[in-house]
Amino acid sequence: MIQDHHRFCIAPMMKKTDRHFRFLARQFTNKSMLYTEMIHANAVLKGDVEKLLSFSNVEHPLGLQLGGSDPQMLAEASIIGQEFGYDEINLNVGCPSKKVKSGNFGVFLMKNVDLLSACVDAVKKRINIPFTIKCRIGVDDFEGEEYLVKFVKTIADLGVKTFIIHARKAISGLDTKRNRSIPPLNYELVFKIKELFPDLNIVINGGIEEISSVKDLLNNVDGVMLGRKIYSDPAFLLQIDKEIYLDENKLDFESGMNNYMNYILSLDNPKDVNRAITHLVQIIRRISHTKKIRKQLLENVRDGAKDLEHIFNGFKKDLHQTTHLQTH
């Protein structure tokens, strides 16, 4: 059941949660819900759809996150996502970037609930897979309990059952990075939404770093979403299936790393290889003995990745001897 997978979600992150990173994440968790990067509906309709939307079957359960504010474009893009085999379509109503503001989508749809409602209604009428919303608790002067309750009720009345809520408001004058830290967290307001709407699936996001925090939050909401914590430390996911889903799998760090390196070697496109190596560098930087390996990998990205197999073989031997991982 898709709702069960929402107990732990990996956030959509631009230039991070591409199909290569999602394959890496799947080496450490079978159960967590994965999402694509945000893809604008216009790109789906007019771009290279195979390149944008293709994914591996191991990535399920997987949601496609769309951006945009044109109801018909979003509906058509959602149909394509459904046809590609995604388990869920998610609409980005939380991104506060300047590009998003100029296009009047993302979190700025929270200021225009009539337009958002038209988008939701158009999509819901055209697809039969779950359609979810990722939003914030408010934006600029559109904030507070009364506002958020009305917002959630309006969208829920259109048939949306799952809300992923970043427990910060967005502030127009701040860039994306500062909007992740300067507006204060308000978990209690998200808890209140769950209390008032017990039949909705409420997932909380923002400022979560520890497995203990994940467990505590699940006492008040249905699911928890983490983003940059997971990107900087994908092996954190090794705890999730066991601790959150009570699933005893046989996933382990060494096997996951070996699988991912073999995956990189199977890629044909040099750009794909470089992107996949970038994710690998992120995870091995947390291993105490890998500075030399990181340097070799980055040099290979610049030189066309000619010696990857040799580097990986050396790293696999090193990894087998010592798998000391600096986890939190």
Image (cartoon, rainbow, N blue to C red):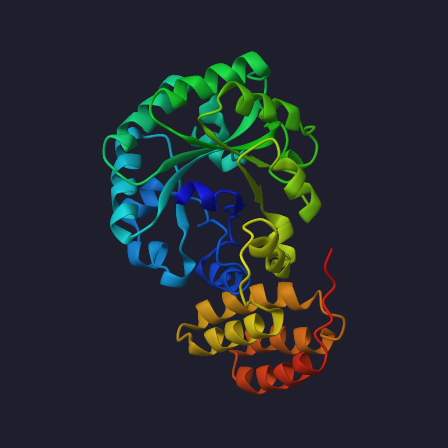
Q: Is residue 268 above or below residue 125?
A: below
Measuring from the top left, give residue 286's x and y in whole percent: 71, 65
**Quarter of the image where the C terminus is located:** bottom right
Horizontal and vertical percent position of residue 118: 31, 23
Position of residue 319 measured from the top left corner of the image (x, y, whole percent):
66, 79
Look at 23% across and 35% down and name the residue there. Answer: 126
Q: Residue at x 67, y 48 (%)?
A: 211
Viewer-nearest residue: 50 or 5: 5
Q: Nearer the viewer, residue 184 or 14?
A: 184
Q: Residue lying farthest right?
A: 288
Residue occupying image coordinates x 58% and y 68%: 280
Is 72 above or below relative to 231?
above
In the rendered view, tell whether residue 322 sits above or below residue 150: below
Residue 247 lies left or right of residue 239; in this view the side is left
Which image quarter holds the N terminus?
top left
Residue 279 in the image, given as x and y percentages of width and height: 57, 63
Q: Quadrant of residue 167?
A: top right
In the picture, measured across the screen, residue 42 lies left or right of residue 17, that is left
Whether residue 10 is visible to the viewer of this picture, yes or no, is: no
Instruction: Say which of 12 and 236 sits in front.
Output: 236
- From the viewer's perspective, is residue 183 above or below residue 278? above
Residue pushed farthest top? 146
> Taking the image as drawn, is residue 234 in sight?
yes
Please report the residue visible at 64 percent of the width from the left and 64 percent of the height from the top.
Answer: 283
Nearer to the camera, 190 or 194: 194
- Give the tally of numbered discs: 0
